Every structure is written in C-alpha cells, then in structure tokens.
Image (tube, rainbow, N blue to C red):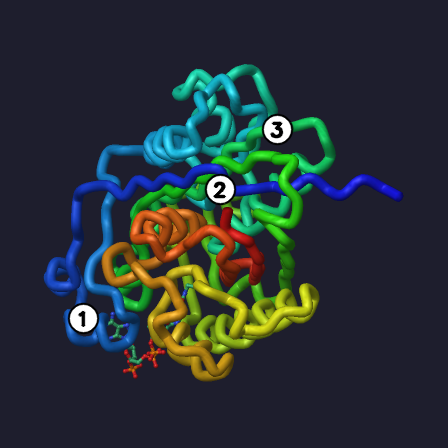
C-alpha cells in the first residue's frame, strides 16, 4: 500500500495595504463619476495607493508578517513564488527581488502570471512542488501595484482597482487530511481581449504612438467580464465540491477574489448560500488582482472567520480569461 500523501498546510498569512487611501469622492474629482455610482455598482468605498512603494516592497511587508505568523524565518524558506501582473520590472522576477530584500537563501524563486486568479495558480504550483518531496516551506505572494497600469482618465476601470500584497507560508506536514485538499484551474485564451493590457510586451513595446494611444493601460469590457465571472466562479465552485464529494453546506467560509459585490450577490443566489458566507473586504481595497485572495484570507483569519477544522473555499476569476477554486481544511 502506498504511503498517504503529506498534507500541505497554510502555516501563516500576512498582508500589506499601503496607508494612502483614495476614496470614491477623491475619484469623482478626477473623472465623471460619483460615490453613489461606485458604491451601488461595485460595493467599493475606497482603495489604497502604493505611491512610491514598488510591488516587491509591498510583497516583502506581507511576507514578513506571514513568516512571523508561521513562526518561521527567511532561512526556513526553500521556494518563493510571486503572482503579479505588475512586477517591478520584466526581469529580474519580483520573487528574486523579494528573496534579496528578505535574505532568503539561494532557493528557487519565480513569478507566475494568471491575473486575478494568480494566487490560486501559485497555490496549486506550490502545493504540487511541496508534495513532490523536494521542498518544505514555500512563500506564496500575490502583490500588485494596479495604480501603475490604470488609466486614470478612464472611469470604466479606474474606480475598480487598488494596490496591496498578501502572502502565505505553505508547509509540508505529516498530519493527514488537512490543509489544501485540492485546487482546480482553468483558462479560456479566446476571451483574452475582454480584460488586458495591450502594450508593454513584445507585441507592443513603448513608442510615441503606443503611448498616445494609451496602450500601456489596462482595458476592460466590464459587462462581458461580469457575465463570465459569475458563470465560471459558479462552475469552479460546484466542480471542486463535486470532486471532493462535498456540498456548499459543508463550506464554513468562501474567500472569493474581491472584484464586485454584485458578483458575490449573484453567486450567493445561484449557490443558494447566504451572502454572509462570503468573506468581503472589497469596500476598503477594491480589486487588488492577484493580491486580493491572500489579503482577504489574512483578514478572515485575523477576524476569526477561519477556525480549525473549517472547510474554506477560495474562488477566483481574472484576465486570460483564467479561473480557479481551491478547498482548504483549516488547521
Ligand atoms: C464595470 C461595472 C461595475 C459596470 O457596471 P454596469 O452595471 O455593468 O454598468 P454598465 O457597463 O452597464 O454602464 C452603465 C453606464 O455607466 C457608465 N459608467 C461606467 N463607469 C462609470 C463610473 N465610474 N461612474 C459613472 N458612470 C459610469 C457607463 O459609461 C454607462 O453609461 P452609458 O449607458 O451612457 O453608456 C461592471 O460591469 C463590473 O463590475 N464588471 C466586472 C468588472 C470586473 O470585475 N473586472 C475585474 C475582473 S477580475
């Protein structure tokens, strides 16, 4: 008989949200919008702005807290994965920059990009690498400086996003049947143009023309994204529960990607769940892309919403299009 698989557990969480607050009223001074419109259409009241802090610097702050909560030091980490669409620069990776700032030993460090679903992609990659036997403690970070790719003249998008970082320490333990039970991931590249940043890559390096055409900012078709988000988040939730022969009533807390309260309301209705089963903090931070789930997870833990033995469901959706869901038995 083969030995049971080791459990991969979240040993500690951390978050960093920069202190500078940008309220809906502040935004209404820049573009033709209002606090009332933003609140009722999205649930967002304010977001944080990193100002001169970089993505890696925010990631480092979140990571320090996760290490402290895990009772581990930088020396204990043997894998660093950063999920981001706003790296400090194309290379070196943000993960390598974090490694250097934290004094982590000469271990594997890389970035992974799956937009707002990035943290769940990192969770799956980290879990499988730990399970393979070669790694013991991984630092997984979602960090974004969305303010650096937002078009501050576009009211359709600038009201939605914010900056921040969240981190977890993922560790291998001998305990059975706890921690990350499974993760499902998916993507549909044919719908990539619904949410994208056309410029800055090899197909559109910065030129005078591309700058004038505002190609280096995030572009979005909000209505289509909304419809896709509801559909795939519902599907990803149902699929992972079915795979583990569980139902929505077994889930103590859903920690979703924080995009729009109306997406949660529609999901809650379709899944026949009370809205308070969803952990929400989007009113304070807006959509922080890959950082949103680890920040929410950390705050849910801080607020005692995650208790030992609880079944936690993470679900995300983002550009790519990408999506994912993950089931965790909290320890
Ligand atoms: C963006 C979003 C909030 C727009 O809400 P909506 O109810 O779909 O609004 P609509 O797109 O129907 O636009 C309604 C009107 O409001 C206007 N509008 C858009 N942004 C506005 C703003 N910030 N303030 C005021 N009016 C705004 C539109 O121009 C449109 O005007 P029109 O009818 O004259 O053309 C919503 O579609 C959404 O949340 N989509 C998903 C976005 C998302 O989560 N992206 C990240 C995924 S990871």
Beta carbon at label 3 within 8 Å of ligand 1: no
Q: Report if residue 56 is visible in the image.
A: no
Measured Cα–Cα span from mark 1 to mark 2: 32 Å
Give the residue drawn at x 44%, y 43%. 142
Kindly tell me whether mark 2's CB lies below 8 Å from ligand 1: no
**Does residue 167 sit above or below 159 in this rendering?**
above
User: Which of label 3 and label 2 is nearer to you?
Assistant: 3
Residue highlighted by disc 3: 136
Is residue 183 toward the left or the right of residue 73 in the image? right
Between marks 3 and 2, how big is the CA–CA gap?
39 Å
What residue would you read off at disc 2? Answer: 205
Q: Residue 33 carries which label?
A: 1
Does residue 8 appear anywhere in the picture?
Answer: yes
Please state which of residues 39 and 281 is positioned toward the viewer in this rendering.
281
Instruction: Please rate how many residues cluster around mark 2, counting C-alpha atoms within 10 Å: few if below 14, some from 14 to 19, many from 20.
Output: some
Near-viewer residue (180 or 269): 180
76 w.r.t. 193: above or below: above
Sequence-wise first label, 3 or 2: 3
In front of the other: 19 or 132 = 132
| Between marks 1 and 2 in the image, the one whose residue lies nearer the viewer | 1
Q: Earlier in the sequence, mark 1 or mark 3?
A: 1
Quarter of the image for the N terminus: give it.
top right
Ligand 1 has an atom within 8 Å of the beta carbon of the residue at disc 1: yes
N-terminal of the pair, mark 1 or mark 2, is 1
């Amino acid at each position: 008989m083969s030995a049971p698989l080791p459990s991969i557990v979240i040993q500690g969480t951390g978050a960093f949200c920069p202190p500078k607050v940008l309220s809906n009223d502040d935004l209404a001074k820049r573009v033709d919008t209002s606090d009332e419109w933003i609140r009722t259409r999205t649930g967002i009241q304010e977001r944080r702005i990193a100002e001169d802090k970089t993505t890696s610097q925010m990631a480092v702050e979140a990571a320090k807290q996760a290490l402290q909560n895990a009772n581990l030091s930088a020396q204990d980490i043997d894998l660093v994965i950063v999920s981001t669409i706003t790296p400090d620069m194309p290379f070196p990776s943000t993960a390598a920059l974090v490694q250097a700032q934290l004094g982590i030993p000469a271990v594997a460090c890389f970035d992974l990009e799956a937009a707002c679903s990035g943290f769940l992609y990192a969770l799956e990659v980290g879990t499988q690498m730990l399970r393979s036997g070669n790694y013991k403690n991984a630092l997984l970070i979602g960090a974004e400086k969305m303010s650096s790719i937002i078009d501050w003249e576009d009211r359709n998008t600038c009201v939605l996003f914010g900056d921040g970082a969240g981190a977890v320490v993922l560790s291998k333990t001998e305990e059975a049947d706890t921690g990350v039970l499974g993760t499902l991931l998916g993507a549909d590249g044919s719908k990539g143009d619904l949410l994208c940043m056309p410029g800055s890559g090899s197909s559109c390096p910065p030129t005078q023309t591309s700058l004038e055409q505002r190609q280096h900012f995030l572009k979005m078709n909000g209505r289509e994204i909304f419809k896709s988000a509801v559909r795939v988040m519902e599907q990803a939730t149902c699929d992972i529960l079915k795979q583990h022969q569980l139902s929505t009533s077994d889930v103590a807390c859903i920690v979703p990607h924080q995009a729009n309260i109306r997406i949660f309301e529609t999901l809650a209705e379709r899944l026949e769940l009370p809205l308070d089963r969803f952990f929400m903090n989007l009113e304070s931070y807006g959509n922080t892309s890959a950082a949103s789930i680890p920040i929410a997870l950390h705050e849910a833990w801080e607020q005692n919403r995650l208790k030992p033995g609880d079944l936690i469901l993470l679900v995300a959706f983002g550009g790519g299009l990408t999506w994912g869901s993950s089931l965790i038995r909290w320890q």
